[in-house]
Amino acid sequence: MLKGGLVSIEAAMGSLKPMERRAAQYIMEHPEQVVSLSVQKLAEFAGVSEATIVRLSRSLHCKGFQELKLRIAGDLSQSSLPTESYQEIRTDGSIVDLIKSVSNNNIVSIQDTLTVLSPESVEKAINSLSSARKVGVFGVGASAVIAKDFMQKLTRINRWCEIGTGFDAQATIAANLIPGDVVFGISYSGQTEDMIRALAVAKNNGASVITLTRFGANPVSELADIQLFISTLEKSIRSGAMASRISQLNVIDILYAGIAGRHYDESIKSLEKTRQAVSVGKRNG
């Protein structure tokens, strides 16, 4: 059964338009009732137009209100199971509490991301990256760590990949991309101005654009041909970068495994070659 309706709404709440937000708040407060309502009745109860309900469904990357209801119903069907929520990272607790809270938040972040990560989009991204002549990977700040991890993985299986962690490098890479190339932009906020400019250059040159951002409307994902999303709902600024990083890395691992699987024999040979080269370098050093 489809799931992730309520997680998607909560994750996207800050990026919704005012009337969409009003409808979303009503849904969050009355999920059991909503799954049995028509578009007309929900619009009436929420005090919005029917068109707003349709737009809200699309903003949540659902094909329509029916799919949104199915996702909410899937969430409710799991309500009897034990669930965890994000926990505040405390500085005055025990080490045991610290270990549990950080680990719990990472686990919940990955679980929430699975509800907003589209299998269709993942498959499209794997296909696009697998067939690309050249891949440019962009990330700034904390996202640069994720970009470097992806670049290292792609390089080990002999994929032509370049990384840009600042505007100058990103713009330079983007300027030399051509149709058949792919640029992969990683930005948790989806608001990184330099990346938006660099992605626009790549898109104008005919390169395919894939983005990995937090769920909801944002300028980075709006430039994408293929949108991938993560969801982290914790409220504390202290824990946000940690949980989101784990979710991003999980998506990167999924893509890497998919790409390697498309060229399995070639990937195995490349991994063995790089392993041997690194081992020889260490021995000689």
Image: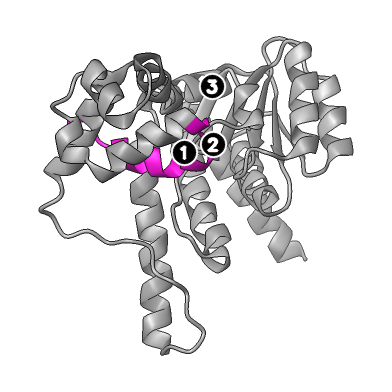
Kindly report the distance in space between the C-alpha atoms of the residues bearing marks 1 and 2: 6 Å
The 10 Å Cα crowd at callout 1, few under 14, some 14 to 19, many 20 or more, is: many
Q: Are marks 3 and 2 in contact (CB under 8 Å)?
A: no
Q: Quadrant of residue 203?
A: top right
Kindly report the distance in space between the C-alpha atoms of the residues bearing marks 3 and 2: 19 Å
Residue 273: in magenta span: no
The 10 Å Cα crowd at callout 2, few under 14, some 14 to 19, many 20 or more, is: some
**Residue 65's x, y, as percent?**
29, 20
Report the residue at 47% width, 74% height from top: 89
Report the residue at 39% width, 69% height from top: 87
Report the residue at 45% width, 47% height from top: 250
Kindly report the distance in space between the C-alpha atoms of the residues bearing marks 3 and 1: 18 Å
Amino acid identity at mark 3 = Ile
Tag shown at residue 15: 2
**Residue 95's x, y, as percent?**
42, 87
Q: Is residue 105 depicted above or below 124 in this figure?
A: below
The residue indicated by pointer 1 is 12
Task: Give whichever of 216, 262 is nearer the camera.
Answer: 216
Q: Are marks 1 and 2 in contact (CB under 8 Å)?
A: yes
Can the viewer see residue 258 in this picture? no
**Residue 122's x, y, as percent?**
44, 27
The 10 Å Cα crowd at callout 3, few under 14, some 14 to 19, many 20 or more, is: many
The residue indicated by pointer 3 is 226
What span is in magenta? Answer: 1-18
Give the main secondary structure of the magenta stretch.
Answer: helix
Q: Is residue 38 left or right of residue 179?
A: left
Image quarter hosting the N terminus:
top left
